[in-house]
């Protein structure tokens, strides 16, 4: 794409609304807007100060298209670093397109996805990681993802990487200087100080790399699978967690034959709950497909909730006072076997065992049940009892300490891969120092580490990388 022409795009979502904002950026943005904007006070836009607002009409010849509010920004003090005009018009799709087409006829080009932010990056208004954070900010759906995007957009991550890169660059310069005096056998870079710096860089890189596990789930929402036998209340629990009738609830076993998913935010952290088909032996082909998908969802989930119906426990397992003899019986021993199967099949996943329908048990029966199953949580999805406690337990699976302390959390896969590569090169430098390698050999690995640091902030980049990053942006940003 050309980066020295004038571009235009709708900056607000398409469709009808109260207002819409149309953005124009480029060297002649203000010149192009001047002849088609008739100010209420007969002002010439070219003579107005930056960051000012002006009321008037957008006209096409003698025809008034709309009464608008025009914002004027002079480069480099604008989002893109170029002259920029933003037109706030009425939100009719017809009006939006009439204004855009008018400027296209006057010499503007329709902007590509992310082109405004790309120009901001190329004009030095932000680095590459900050530009990527803007896309994350736009797509943030909960407090956690919003906070991480804001922290990165303010440059917290960039600053940390740039400081490490600068310190390494200073030592690299001394190492390179030694190469110029190789015959004189002089040492400009103190090897002990260099070892301390390498240890510091390793520590920071490992912390950032470890944060990706937390950041990735916080950014995308933590998938939680609700599993168990048919008719134990999985769909009722989903509805209770979402506080809406999202899933069909029926006394008929096997009602849920496919997975149902929905998201909520708990204390600012996004959770994606997955109601699965009941696990049982059945001849029903469709239900078997649903059960197969249940195990697929368990493998994809971060947390598994195993739900059973406490009111169905077999007489003798508990000190039961009244049990409906028509109900199916389940004993605790069989229950433990089923729980162990899930644990053995998915050993790395946190598993919460939940006893549902405790509203049908006495306090004595509940205490006896909790004594027999370690870590058991009890609730009644129907009445809502214990649901809030479950939500708080889920939050404990997420290490939000770094988030609360405003520490840098890596959420971008590209950054994560670059950090892994940088750490690999830094480890090579450490090995070289430990084996007293010559400066010319150390310099090779140092340059590689610097390269990966530069990739994160965009100091080292290429057109393909920029194309891939900004292609994921929305039009108009």
Image (cartoon, rainbow, N blue to C red):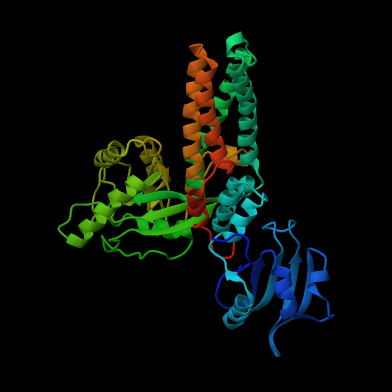
Residue at x 69% of width, y 68% of height: 29
Left or right: 466 in relation to 154: left
Specify whether residue 267 is in view.
Answer: no
Residue at left offset 48%, top offset 11%? 435
Q: Is residue 4 visible?
A: yes
Is 419 rendered above or below residue 128?
above
Q: Nearer the viewer, residue 288 or 116?
A: 116
**From this viewpoint, which residue is outermost toward the bottom?**
62
* In the rendered image, the vertical position of residue 231 relative to residue 167, given as above or below: below
The answer to which image quadrant residue 290 occupies is bottom left
Residue at horizontal 57 percent and vertical 29 percent from the top: 204
Position in image of residue 163 (x %, y %): 65, 32
Q: Where is residue 457 in the image (x, y as percent from the top left)?
A: 59, 42
Q: Is residue 323 left or right of residue 32?
A: left
| Furthest-top residue in this view | 185
Residue 221 image position (x, y, % from top left):
48, 51
- Image quadrant for the C terminus? bottom right
For this orientation, the residue located farthest to the left is 283
Pick whichever, 11 or 460, lies toward us.
Answer: 460
Which quarter of the figure is the N terminus placed in? Answer: bottom right
**Total numbered labels:** 0
Q: In this view, does 306 lie to the left or right of 446?
A: left
Give the camera-side residue of 348 and 86. Answer: 86
Please provide percent x and percent y for residue 360. 38, 53
């Amino acid at each position: 794409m050309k980066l020295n022409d004038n571009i235009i795009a709708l900056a607000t979502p398409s469709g009808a609304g109260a207002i819409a904002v149309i953005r124009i950026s480029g060297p002649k943005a203000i010149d192009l807007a001047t002849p088609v904007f008739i100010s209420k006070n007969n002002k010439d836009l070219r003579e107005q100060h930056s960051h000012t607002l002006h009321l008037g009409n957008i006209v096409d010849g003698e025809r008034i298209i709309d009464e608008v509010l025009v914002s004027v920004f002079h480069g480099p003090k604008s989002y893109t670093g170029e002259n920029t005009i933003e037109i706030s018009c009425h939100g009719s799709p017809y009006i939006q397109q009439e204004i855009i087409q008018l400027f296209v006829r006057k010499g503007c080009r329709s902007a590509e996805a992310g082109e405004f932010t790309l120009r901001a990056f190329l004009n030095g208004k932000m680095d590459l990681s900050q530009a990527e954070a803007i896309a994350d900010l736009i797509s943030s759906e909960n407090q956690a993802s919003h906070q991480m995007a804001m922290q990165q957009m303010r440059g917290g991550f960039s600053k940390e990487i740039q400081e490490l890169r600068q310190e390494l660059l200073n030592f690299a310069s001394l190492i390179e200087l030694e190469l110029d005096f190789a015959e004189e056998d002089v040492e400009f870079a103190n090897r002990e100080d260099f070892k301390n710096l390498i240890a510091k860089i390793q520590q920071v890189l490992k912390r950032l790399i470890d944060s990706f596990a937390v950041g990735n789930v916080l950014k995308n929402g933590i998938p939680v699978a609700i599993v168990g036998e048919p008719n134990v209340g999985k769909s009722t629990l989903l509805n209770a967690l979402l506080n809406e009738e999202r899933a069909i609830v029926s006394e008929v076993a096997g009602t849920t034959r496919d997975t149902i998913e929905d998201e909520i935010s708990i204390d600012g952290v996004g959770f994606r709950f997955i109601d699965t088909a009941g696990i049982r032996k059945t001849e029903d082909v469709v239900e078997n497909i649903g059960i197969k998908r249940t195990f697929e969802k368990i493998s994809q989930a971060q947390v598994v909730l195993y739900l059973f119906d406490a009111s169905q426990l077999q007489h003798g397992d508990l000190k039961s006072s009244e049990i409906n003899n028509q109900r199916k019986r389940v004993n605790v021993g069989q229950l433990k076997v089923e729980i162990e199967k899930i644990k053995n099949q998915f050993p790395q996943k946190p598993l919460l065992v939940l006893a549902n329908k405790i509203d049908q048990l006495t306090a004595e029966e509940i205490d006896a049940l909790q004594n027999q199953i370690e870590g058991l949580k009890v609730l009644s999805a129907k009445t809502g009892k214990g649901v809030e406690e479950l939500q708080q337990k889920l939050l404990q699976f997420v290490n939000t300490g770094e988030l609360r302390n405003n520490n840098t959390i890596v959420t971008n896969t590209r950054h994560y891969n670059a950090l892994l590569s940088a750490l690999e090169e830094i480890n090579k430098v450490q090995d070289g120092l430990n084996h007293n390698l010559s400066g010319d050999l150390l310099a090779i690995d140092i340059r590689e580490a610097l390269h990966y640091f530069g990739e994160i902030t965009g100091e080292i980049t290429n057109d393909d990388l920029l194309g891939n990053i900004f292609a994921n942006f929305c039009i108009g940003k």
